[in-house]
């Protein structure tokens, strides 16, 4: 038995340090490192602790495959890697000759958050052939745009510093499902007297873990946040000196906030006016106070405006300058990878296509049309909006689809060529945290299973087969790791230690006390060094609220993360059934019994599942977990079949929570 140190690259803020037990070349167990990682603390989530089940699952893709049946049938025949590479490059060359490189569309997202698997050779390859670029908007587009415009992605409060806070607001986040290591710090903070508030249509944390839950209606976050700001002004809790020295745009923000008195905001958000006043009063009185702004509030038409209002609350009240005070969103901007030396002046295509509109991109006439789709690090049939439109597009006879994945996903079943991908336990990579302040090295614990190949080596092989002799296509995975370590700025020009990264260890950011204090050791990275409370990207109508309503479909659909999957990863074994969660009052109006089979539907499609009645979901809302595979429902559709392809106007972000639906019970059960 040997123990291999590595770091988790999955799409989670925590970047956990891992210890992998290996016996006779097989993974036997995965544990959290008992070393000095600032966040992991020796434990990891149940998802990654069970990851060996994915490595050896019956659906694991072991060899290259060619479609042998109808598209979507999931019928394939085994081929060699040489045959697969030859077929892909032959088809690509023909498409480029007939339509140009922009007719090829790469489609990738957060299946791995590693730089090597998602930022280097893959991007270089698609730039080299002139392919269209994909705009990554399924998550974090509005939050990223606003955080950059307001604060220049200033590093935020570290999870371990939440214990110092006297008030914590968790807004649009579900740490039990998607940032488990924040939970112990929330619990410790409460033991020390902190007042914990959650703002979410669904009560994700247990009632015993919070002091106040605010079950607002989806899309109303901007109204609620502006009303809190207005109440802070009324209380005289505005830090005028801080605003004068460190911000711009406060007057415009306050003028807008006056339009949202507590009574008006409460009617829009579906909460009590006294709740708004209590939040403002407690926030005004608490020091330190921290805002954990999640990604739930961005997933609608008003998303960017809501994030701008929420992130303004710590600034107007002067909550910076003390450990445990300020805000946390994504800390990914604390480290920046310099890609210029890698790309050697190579520029990507100017055509950028929004991944949230994949159904339209595959079905609508474009110039040039999308003739080839290359999917990796992503399972759009389970994650992208308008599932039925995507299926129609993938079914086109003239579309050549390649999927590189670890297991036979819902998307892979539609591919012409399926390629076996390594898991992170079989590959090299470098992971930058976006919650915790570490950079970690991912190293193989076992040899690649079957004929699986890591992303970087796949795209290097494709580049060589296209006839290119670029040095980027001759780099080993270890070479790529060294490049990242040598070109990743962790602050003040400091680079991670290459030997540490290659050994599967981690390196900390260079902050006094190992974590930043906003406006003491971390400052806005905007051009003028100030907080832009009225960011220009909001346009002529900042902090606007647009109501999304349809009398035919009176219920709002939300699609929160599951504690059993990371987006759709591990859905092959860890998420056997999708349920619709409904408030008992909404069920009573419709004659729906707990556990009954229901039809959740709108004009885009329908999902047939069993229902769970629960008071944790507010009235007027239906909740179905995101990322579920099609086998988890009774009719093969999942929640994304009901989500529109409309996008948030500021950033192009996906508007999952704009979905409006109705629910009816089927049969006599």
Image: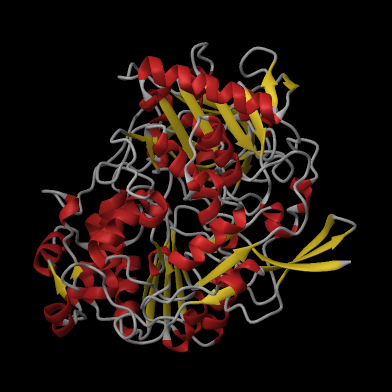
- At x 28%, y 52%, the residue is 304
Q: Is residue 147 above or below residue 594?
A: below
> Which picture quadrant has residue 235?
bottom left
Q: Is residue 647 above or below residue 94?
A: below
Judging depth in this view, the residue of 276 and 295 nearest the camera is 295
- At x 56%, y 50%, the residue is 475
Quadrant of image for the C terminus:
top right
**Relative side of 358 to 160, left or right:** left
**Relative side of 279 to 163, left or right:** left
- Residue 620 in view, yes or no: no
Residue 89 in the image, given as x and y percentages of width and height: 54, 25
Judging depth in this view, the residue of 346 and 245 nearest the camera is 346
Q: How many numbered marks, from 0 up? A: 0
Judging depth in this view, the residue of 267 and 574 nearest the camera is 574
Residue 308 in the image, given as x and y percentages of width and height: 26, 59
Quadrant of image for the N terminus:
bottom right
> Which picture quadrant has residue 634?
top right
> Which picture quadrant has residue 60?
top right
Residue 210 in the image, given as x and y percentages of width and height: 52, 71
- Residue 468 in view, yes or no: yes
The type of colouring in the image is secondary structure
Q: Is residue 43 above or below residue 81?
A: below
> Which residue occupies the extreme front position in the image?
469
- At x 61%, y 39%, the residue is 628
Judging depth in this view, the residue of 311 and 77 nearest the camera is 77
């Amino acid at each position: 038995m040997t123990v291999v140190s590595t770091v988790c690259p999955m799409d989670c803020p925590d970047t956990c340090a891992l210890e992998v037990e290996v016996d006779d070349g097989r993974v036997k167990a995965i544990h959290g490192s008992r070393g000095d990682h600032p966040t992991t603390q020796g434990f990891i989530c149940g998802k990654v602790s069970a990851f060996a089940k994915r490595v050896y699952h019956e659906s694991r893709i072991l060899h290259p495959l060619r479609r042998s049946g109808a598209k979507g049938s999931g019928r394939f025949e085994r081929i060699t890697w040489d045959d697969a590479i030859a077929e892909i490059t032959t088809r690509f060359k023909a498409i480029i000759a007939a339509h140009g490189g922009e007719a090829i569309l790469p489609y990738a997202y957060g299946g791995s958050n590693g730089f090597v698997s998602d930022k280097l050779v893959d991007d270089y390859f698609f730039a080299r052939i002139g392919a269209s670029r994909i705009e990554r908007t399924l998550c974090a587009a509005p939050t990223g745009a606003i955080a950059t415009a307001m604060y220049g992605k200033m590093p935020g409060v570290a999870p371990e510093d939440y214990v110092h806070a006297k008030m914590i607001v968790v807004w649009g986040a579900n740490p039990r499902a998607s940032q488990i290591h924040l939970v112990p710090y929330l619990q410790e903070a409460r033991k020390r007297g902190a007042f914990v508030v959650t703002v979410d249509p669904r009560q994700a944390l247990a009632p015993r873990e919070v002091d106040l839950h605010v079950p607002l209606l989806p899309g109303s976050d901007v109204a609620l946040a502006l009303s809190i700001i207005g109440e802070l002004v009324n209380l005289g809790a505005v830090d005028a000196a801080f605003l004068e020295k460190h911000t711009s745009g406060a007057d415009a923000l306050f003028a807008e906030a006056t339009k949202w008195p507590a009574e008006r905001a409460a009617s829009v958000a579906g909460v009590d006016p006294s709740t708004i006043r209590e939040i403002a009063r407690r926030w005004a009185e608490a020091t330190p106070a921290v805002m954990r702004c999640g990604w739930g509030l961005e997933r609608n038409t008003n998303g960017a405006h809501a994030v701008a209002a929420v992130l303004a609350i710590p600034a107007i009240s002067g909550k910076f300058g003390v450990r445990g005070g300020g805000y946390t969103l994504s800390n990914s901007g604390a480290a920046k990878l310099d890609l210029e030396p890698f790309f050697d002046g190579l520029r990507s295509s100017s055509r950028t296509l929004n991944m949230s509109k994949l159904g339209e991109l595959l079905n609508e006439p474009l110039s040039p049309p999308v003739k080839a789709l290359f999917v990796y690090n992503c399972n759009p049939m389970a994650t992208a909006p308008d599932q039925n439109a995507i299926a129609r597009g993938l079914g086109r006879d003239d579309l050549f689809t390649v999927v590189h994945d670890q297991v036979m996903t819902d998307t892979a079943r539609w591919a012409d060529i399926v390629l076996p991908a390594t898991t992170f336990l079989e590959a090299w990579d470098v992971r930058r945290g976006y919650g915790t302040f570490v950079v970690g090295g991912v190293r193989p614990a076992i040899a690649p299973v079957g004929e699986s190949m890591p992303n970087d080596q796949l795209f290097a092989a494709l580049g060589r087969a296209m006839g290119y002799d670029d040095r980027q296509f001759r780099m080993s995975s270890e070479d790529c790791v060294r490049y990242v370590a040598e070109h990743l700025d962790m602050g003040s020009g400091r680079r991670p230690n290459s030997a540490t990264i290659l050994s599967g260890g981690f390196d900390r950011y260079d902050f006094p006390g190992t974590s930043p204090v906003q406006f003491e050791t971390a400052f806005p990275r905007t051009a003028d060094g100030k907080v832009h409370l009225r960011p220009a990207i909001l346009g002529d109508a900042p902090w606007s609220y647009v109501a999304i309503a349809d009398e035919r479909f009176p219920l709002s659909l939300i699609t929160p993360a599951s504690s059993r999957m990371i987006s759709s990863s591990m859905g092959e074994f860890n998420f056997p059934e999708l349920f619709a969660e409904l408030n008992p009052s909404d069920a009573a109006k419709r004659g729906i019994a707990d556990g009954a089979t229901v039809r959740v539907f709108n004009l885009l499609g329908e999902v047939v599942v069993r229902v769970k009645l629960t008071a944790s979901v507010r009235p007027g809302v239906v909740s179905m977990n995101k990322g579920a595979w099609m086998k988890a429902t009774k009719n093969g559709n999942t929640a994304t079949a009901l989500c529109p392809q409309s996008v948030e106007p500021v950033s192009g972000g996906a508007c999952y929570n704009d979905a409006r639906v109705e629910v009816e019970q089927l049969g006599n059960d």
